[in-house]
Amino acid sequence: MDDGYRAGNRVILCTDTYTLSEVELLISVLTDKFSLDAKLYNRRQQGKLLCWRIAISGKPENLAKLRSIVLPYFISSMLYKLGL
């Protein structure tokens, strides 16, 4: 619940310690199994690659689907991350 944040209308999952192939595998699960619009996102600082993250599209239908998947597992103090 805590390794992520909202950036504008997108949701970013912080997978900073994962390898590129692990992040790609997670994205394939999110897209294939859960039909979420998830993309590879690279975090850079001063042009240097720091880590790979997952960006989940902020389209209303995509966010609604994400909420329906994760809401049963969220504790109340983290609901703000889902915009609730």
Image (cartoon, rainbow, N blue to C red):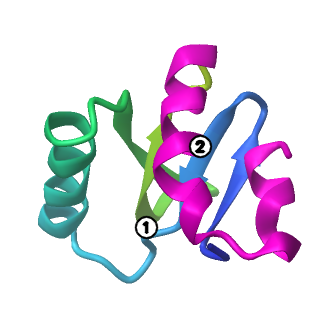
Would residue 75 be counted in the magenta stretch? Answer: yes
- Three-letter code for the amino acid on which mark 2 is drawn: Arg
- The crowding category of the residue bearing disc 1, from other C-alpha atoms within 10 Å (few below 14, some 14 to 19, many at least 20), is some
Residue in front for this viewpoint, 75 or 19: 75
- Three-letter code for the amino acid on which mark 1 is drawn: Cys
Residue 51, disc: 1
Residue 67, disc: 2
Q: Is residue 44 visible?
A: no
Would residue 54 be counted in the magenta stretch? Answer: no
What span is colored magenta in the figure?
Answer: 60-84
Q: Residue at x 37, y 27 (%)?
A: 37
Q: Quadrant of residue 28?
A: top left
Q: Secondary structure at mark 1?
A: strand
Q: Position of residue 47 (x, y in %)?
A: 54, 52
- The crowding category of the residue bearing disc 2, from other C-alpha atoms within 10 Å (few below 14, some 14 to 19, many at least 20), is some
Name the quarter where the N terminus is drawn. bottom right
Q: Position of residue 7 (x, y in %)?
A: 74, 41
Residue in front for this viewpoint, 67 or 22: 67
Height in image: 69 above or below 9?
A: below
Height in image: 24 above or below 37?
A: below
Q: Considering the whole magenta stretch, tell me its main secondary structure.
A: helix
